[in-house]
Each structure stands twice: as structure tokens, then as C-alpha cells.
Image (cartoon, rainbow, N blue to C red):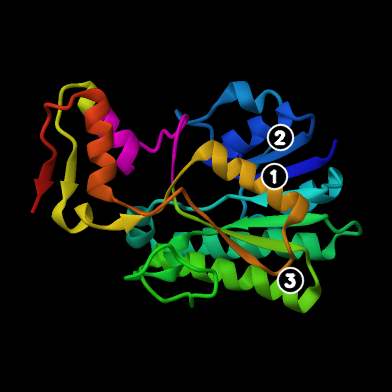
């Protein structure tokens, strides 16, 4: 049994990861800032929960020191693109300084964790004509969310290179699955609309976008593999079986629920 620290445990991915590792006999310690309608208390009841903010540097270090963590899974972030664009200060503080707090805590502990996974995003690559993305592709400056993820990525690799910290970066595609209660996101929003008799809707500029989609259980399995076999300082793309157009994904959902419904394209 190992002690696994998960920042952002209350989130969609954090809850799934906590459940997975607890079920396999590990002790999960979670940093949770807020309790809200998305909180899965049945999962948190199986973990050691610390209430606080990822921006509280001393708290983060204190938790990691107290529990002598063996592995770190850093998920705490502002993941919604629209919110990042509306409030760039908070987005950059959370995504960048929050990551720095976790890495600096790990660097200064008496016992260095065996592996630290930092979750970023394949959006850090920006738009590409040829997919899937390759790890050697350069990271780019784009909107606030994408840029904050690129910064997270480079800072993490810098800590591995400069301080020998065992940091691994995960660049993930679009995640979906059980427990996603960020209802503004594409897949849960489309499902809910159809379940109440409304047509799924897409903006015309989004419909033909090509993205990687990955089920939440698969990303958690990837974390487990990388805790064991990930190479420090390396970034790993984690996606689905193949890139898909957004319109095609929504069409597949529509065909499962009600094939007679037309997808509304908003111009």
C-alpha cells in the first residue's frame, strides 16, 4: 500500500482516480477546496481529506510531509476554457502557481515522492492539421487555458531537469464518463438535452473540430501505469483510439438516444 496525494480530488477526474486507487488498497489523501453539487461524498469518505486551496503553499507542503506521500497526482486546476478566458488572473494563479506549489513542496520534502504526475492537456499543442498529436510537437501560445497548460507542462519538465524531481506530465485529450457534472461540457450537455426532449446543439465553428476523446477510467489506468513505469521529465499523450470530429461524436450519442433528432448547428 502506498500513500497517494491527489490535489483536486473533488473533481471529475480526481474522484475517479481516488476511487480506483482506494479500491486497489492504497491510502489516498485528497486536497479539496470546495464542497458543492459535484462532490462525491461516498468516495471522499474512503480517503483522508484536507480542506484547503492549492495556492496555500505551506498547507500543500504540510499535507505532503505529514502523510509521507509516495506518489503525487496533481489535478487541481481551472479546467473550463470559458472561465479561464473571463478571469485570466485566477486561471494563471491556479494552474501555474498551484503546480509550482506542489512541485516545490515535493522538492523540499525530506522524503521525495517516488513519482509525481502533473495533468496538463493536449490543447497546449494548439491547432494541428495532422492528428493525433505527437509528444515532440512544440507547445504554443494560444488562449488563457491552453497557455496556462503549456506553462504547467514546461515548469514540470524543468523541475525534473533542474532538480532531478521524478515528474511525469500527462497531456490528455477530451475526457468524458460517469461523474462528469460540469454540465456545460460537450458530452454531458448533449446527453442531458436529449433526455429532456431538446436537440443537441453545436456552434458551427466547433462542429468540424477534430479532437481525441478518452473515457475517464482509461485515463486513471494510464496514471497507474505511469506511476510504475513513467520516465521522469517525459510527457505522455493519453487519448482515445483515434481523433474524431465533434459533430461525429454528438451524432453517435444522438443515435443511441433518439436517431430522429436533428443536431442544431448555431451560426
Mark 1 or mark 3: whose residue is earlier in sequence: 3
Q: Which residues are magenta?
A: 175-193
Residue furthest out toward the left: 267
Residue 182, given in percent of the width and then of the height, sits at 39, 38
Q: Within the image, what quadrant is residue 108 found in?
A: bottom right
Q: Which residue is mark 2?
A: 21
Q: Considering only order in the chain, which callout, 3 or 2, is on the residue closer to the N terminus?
A: 2
Q: Nearer the viewer, mark 1 or mark 3?
A: 1
Q: Where 164 sits versus 41, above or below? A: below
Foreground residue, 124 or 83?
A: 124
Looking at the rendered structure, which numbered label has been put on residue 43?
none
With 174 as the anchor, is 108 left or right in this view? Answer: right
Q: Is residue 211 magenta?
A: no
The residue that disc 1 covers is 224
The reply to whether residue 224 is visible in this rendering is: yes
The answer to whether mark 1 and mark 2 are in CB contact below 8 A is yes
Residue carrying label 3: 160
Determine the residue positioned at 47% across, 53% down. 78
Residue 218 x/y as whole percent: 56, 41
Binning the other alpha carbons within 10 Å of mark 3 as few (below 14), some (14 to 19) or many (20 upward) gives: many
Task: Report the front residue among 164 and 33.
Answer: 164
Badge 1 crowding class, 10 Å Cα cut-off, few under 14, some 14 to 19, many 20 or more, is some
Circles 2 and 3, Cβ within 8 Å, touching? The answer is no
Q: Secondary structure at mark 1?
A: helix
**Mark 1 or mark 2: which comes first in sequence?**
2
Residue 48, visible in the rendered structure: no
Q: Secondary structure at mark 2?
A: helix
Quadrant in the picture for residue 19: top right
Q: Is residue 164 above or below residue 119?
A: below
Q: Residue at x 55, y 26 (%)?
A: 40
Give the distance between the C-alpha atoms of the residues marked 1 and 2, in whole angstroms. Answer: 8 Å
Q: Dot 2 surroundings within 10 Å: few (below 14), some, or many (20 or more)?
A: some
Amino acid at each position: 500500500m502506498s500513500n497517494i496525494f491527489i490535489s483536486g480530488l473533488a473533481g471529475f477526474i480526481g474522484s475517479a482516480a481516488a476511487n480506483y486507487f482506494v479500491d486497489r488498497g492504497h491510502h489516498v489523501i485528497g486536497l479539496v477546496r470546495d464542497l458543492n453539487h459535484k462532490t462525491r461524498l461516498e468516495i471522499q469518505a474512503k480517503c483522508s481529506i484536507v480542506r484547503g486551496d492549492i495556492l496555500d503553499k505551506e498547507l500543500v507542503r504540510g499535507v505532503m510531509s505529514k502523510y509521507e506521500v509516495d506518489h503525487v497526482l496533481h489535478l487541481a486546476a481551472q479546467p473550463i476554457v470559458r472561465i479561464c478566458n473571463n478571469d485570466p488572473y485566477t486561471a494563471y494563479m491556479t494552474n501555474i502557481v498551484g503546480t509550482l506549489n506542489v512541485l516545490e513542496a515535493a522538492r523540499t520534502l525530506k522524503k521525495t515522492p517516488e513519482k509525481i504526475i502533473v495533468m496538463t492537456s493536449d490543447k497546449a499543442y494548439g491547432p494541428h492539421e495532422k492528428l493525433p498529436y505527437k509528444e515532440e510537437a512544440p507547445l504554443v501560445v494560444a488562449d488563457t487555458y491552453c497557455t496556462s497548460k503549456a506553462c504547467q507542462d514546461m515548469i514540470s519538465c524543468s523541475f525534473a531537469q533542474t532538480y532531478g524531481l521524478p515528474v511525469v506530465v500527462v497531456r490528455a485529450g477530451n475526457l468524458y464518463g460517469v461523474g462528469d457534472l460540469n454540465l456545460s461540457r460537450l458530452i454531458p450537455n448533449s446527453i442531458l438535452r436529449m433526455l429532456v426532449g431538446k436537440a443537441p446543439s453545436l456552434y458551427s465553428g466547433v462542429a468540424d473540430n477534430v479532437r481525441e476523446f478518452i473515457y475517464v477510467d482509461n485515463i486513471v489506468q494510464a496514471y497507474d501505469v505511469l506511476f510504475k513505469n513513467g520516465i521522469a521529465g517525459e510527457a505522455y499523450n493519453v487519448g482515445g483510439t483515434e481523433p474524431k470530429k465533434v459533430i461525429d461524436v454528438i451524432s453517435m450519442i444522438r443515435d443511441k438516444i433518439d436517431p430522429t433528432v436533428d443536431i442544431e448547428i448555431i451560426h
